[in-house]
Amino acid sequence: MQKRLIIPNLITTFGLACGLFVIFRVNMGGDRTFSLMQTMTYILLMAAFADVLDGAVARAVRGESAFGLEFDSLSDAITFGVAPSALFLSSVFFNDDSLAAFFAICAALIYTICGVLRLVRFNISQAVDKEEKKKPFVGLPIPAAAMAFISPNLFFHAPFFTSKVVLAMEVRAWIMSTIAIVLAYLMLSKIPFSSAKSFNIKLGSFETVFVSMLCIIIFLYGVIYNLATLLLVVSWGYIFCSLILAPFRKKGKN
């Protein structure tokens, strides 16, 4: 393997390791506390950051390759397809064969399968047409879907929510299962979703730098002190904004 390919693939490996860690940890048993779920969410956030970084580094060092593309997709399938479903199922404490338990498992399966299909479709479109990189995504990207999946689950377990709202486990499971199916549909839909590459942002002005730094500070504050609310607002805000803007966009990349 050429040296310029090593760093991007190492970053991808880190993201994959984060997803595997979440899957292994939630299957080790023990109480599913809010603290544990928050820690697993932080780990998946690091994986999402690595998913953005590996592509950026590969382009910077001209280390893009077919191997890297396939490795990244397989990593995403596990980290953003399997891990969120495992985290969801481990948080609902089912010990019976109720209808809610069966529906939750089916919803998790549908979410994961649609996420994998979304990645396959993306890879095929990239191989067919490499000039589509700056257009919006067609269908919800799986990292965004993962954040939108884990955020309401974390929010429902947050102390500030549980202290004010009594939500039965079965009700929470039905809500989260419905969310999983909605996200699965959005991933396979033809709805255009914004891509960071589609924005032409100029960093030369003082106002742009100031606003960017302010947004970063607010984001970091939210991540440290109120992760559940911040992640819920950001992930679902992205989805709703994309749905509102969808009729005004041209068809982008698959």
Image (tube, rainbow, N blue to C red):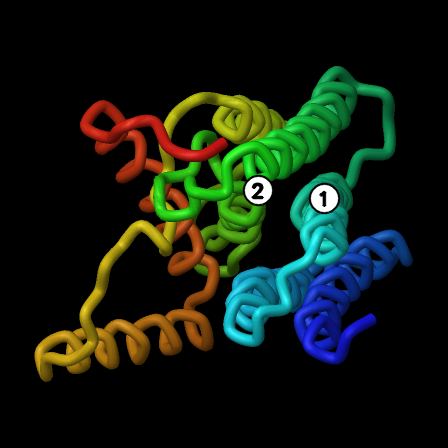
Residue that label 2 marks = 142
Q: Nearer the viewer, residue 63 or 223?
A: 63
Amino acid at pointer 2: Ile
Instruction: Check the picture and name the quadrant holding the N terminus.
Output: bottom right
Element class at badge 1: helix
**Residue 2 in the image: above or below residue 240:** below
Instruction: Classify residue 87 as left or right of residue 172.
Output: right
**Residue 215 in the image: above or below residue 92:** below
Q: Are marks 2 and 1 in contact (CB under 8 Å)?
A: yes
Residue 56 percent coordinates (x, y)? 51, 67
Q: Nearer the viewer, residue 146 or 13?
A: 13
Q: At x 66% / y 70%, what residue is drawn? A: 8
Q: At x 43% / y 42%, what residue is drawn? A: 131
Instruction: Classify residue 61 as left or right of residue 37.
Output: left
Residue 134 percent coordinates (x, y)? 36, 47
- Let me know if residue 42 appears in the view: no
Residue that label 1 marks = 77
* Crowd class of label 1 (few under 14; some 14 to 19; many from 20; radius 10 Å): many
Q: Nearer the viewer, residue 91 or 55?
A: 55
Residue 184 percent coordinates (x, y)? 57, 27
- Let me know if residue 84 appears in the view: yes
Q: CA distance from mark 2 to mark 1?
A: 8 Å
Q: Residue furthest right?
A: 28
Which mark is first along the chain, 1 or 2? 1
**Label tally:** 2
Amino acid at pointer 1: Ala
Based on the displayed image, in which of its 4 quarters is residue 57 positioned? bottom right
* Crowd class of label 2 (few under 14; some 14 to 19; many from 20; radius 10 Å): many
Q: At x 27% / y 28%, what residue is drawn? A: 250
Residue 118 percent coordinates (x, y)? 61, 32
Instruction: Classify residue 58 as left or right of residue 247.
Output: right
